[in-house]
Image: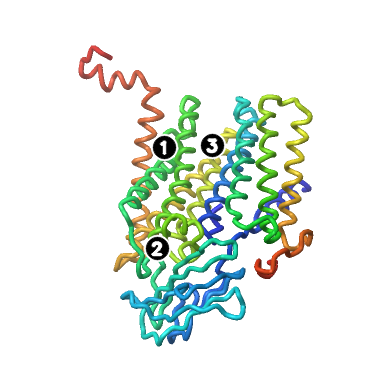
Amino acid sequence: MRRRLLLIVALAALAVPAKAFAHATLLDPSPEYRERLAAGPPAVVLRFDQAVTAFPDSIAVRSGGGRVLSDDAVGAADARVVLVPVRSLPRGAYTVRWHVLSSDGHPISGVYTFGVRVAAPPPTEAFGASGPTRTEDFVRWAYFLSLALVVGGLGFALLVLRGMPPALAGRLYKLIGLGIVATLEVGIIAFLLRAEGALQLPLGKLLYADLTPIANGTRLGTAFMAMTMGFVLVSVLVYFAWLLDRIVFLWPAFVLALGFSSGLSLSGHQAADRGSSWATQVADWIHLSAALLWVGGLVVLAVCVWPLARELRREAFCASRGWRLC
Amino acid sequence: MILFTSSTLHMIAHSAWAQVLMLAGAAEVALARGKLSSRYWHLTIALAFFVSGAASLIHEQNGWLFSRSAFVHHAMGWVMISGALFPLARTFRPRSFALGAGFAATFLVVSVLLYTHRDVAEIFGHLSPVAGAPRR
């Protein structure tokens, strides 16, 4: 009982970590991220957590066509607030791009959207945003391959091998572990590339850019957050299976990996295409899951099973063809 | 690890910090259980301390006395970087009492610093007016 209580207290303490802050952070934008307004606002107001220095071009409000509809930005009596008067805004979607100087000397920037009598697009579709680039396409494929290693590796072990044979266990765990690490790292790279496309900033400024609207206001951001946390949980379950030699931990890991892989589908084109519905999204996820199992299974065969099955290899490639070299 | 999206720098630093600590914890438990046997796996603790300290220093752009948060980030960063020497040396001299004590003391100091980071612990007060209102 006491041990359980200690465990609960420890988990609760971990769930509320101490926050870390450094340079200024945008706390309260008005209009808010992706807010749908009934009428155009008289001004865009940004409230930060620390004092900031504003410039005349600190905030630019642009129409969907790129026309600047804001005047010069001014600082308010409160040094933490910057605002810009906005001309009368007709019905449409608008992009706010801002940059201020934090009191630590670093330029911090951000982008977000709002709509007047229309739904605001995600910040990744703000005016001036670009992408997806060829690099992002490549990273997306790398993300798919990483997921395939995890889902295919777990699926092969549980559905084909019905366990972890001692001869294969080491290689299989390494392959699945590699897949989990790659999924986490490639996910971070994919998210940052998408953010870079939306923010359109050089690396020096991108480091201090506010990613919150992209993390919370886009399908990719939501999928990225959920998948990262989900695959951390998968890594814990796989680790326990390896550590305790208990295959039973691999089943929830497999189910979670399959479930969280849907983020790749839900953040992709399928969920955004015209005519898409929950049924097409489920179909796309099933398609993706089958592809992950198939590709991952092939990799397991090539990397784990193939090097250990000498006799089968000889039979498959040599005996049937009469090769002398084998 | 990726919940700090207030800036790219925060996200990368917290992500790196979380990952190396997970790796070090996993390696230590596996060593204790006998799943891993090489003593060099203990180096993951030194790596975790070093990366955590570096991440803390790199993503704190303010000076030491800007705010309590800035002070704690600097203090914790340097404590962890210097504290990384204890697990590093312990890998090769595991029976040394001094190294073990230094290792334990590092944890103790970091724990105290983490506690003082919270605004409910009024230890350092509020240092700079430009740092904004204290957070709770």
Q: Which residue is mark 2?
A: A198
**Apparent side of residue A235 relative to residue A263 in the rendered image (left or right):** right
Residue A8, position as x, y percentages in the image: 71, 52
Q: Secondary structure at mark 1?
A: helix
Q: Nearer the viewer, mark 1 or mark 2?
A: 2
Q: What is the three-letter code of the residue carrying label 2?
A: Ala
Q: Which residue is mark 3?
A: A247
Q: Of the residues under marks 1 and 3, which one precedes in the sequence?
A: 1
- Where residue A156 is drawn, which disc sits there? 1
The residue that appears at 41% across and 43% down in the rendered structure is: A146
**Residue B84 sits above or below residue A80 on the image:** above
Q: Secondary structure at mark 2?
A: helix
Residue A132, position as x, y percentages in the image: 33, 57
- Where residue A187 is drawn, which disc sits there? none
Q: Secondary structure at mark 3?
A: helix
Q: Of the residues under marks 1 and 2, which one precedes in the sequence?
A: 1
- Which quadrant: the C terminus of chain A? top left
Q: Dot 1, crowdedness within 10 Å: few (<14), some or many (≥20)?
A: many
- Number of numbered discs: 3
Residue A34, position as x, y percentages in the image: 45, 73
**Residue A29 sits above or below residue A264 on the image:** below
Please state the chain letter of the residue tagged with numbered disc 1 in the rendered image.
Answer: A
Please check whether the numbered discs 3 and 2 fall on a single chain. yes
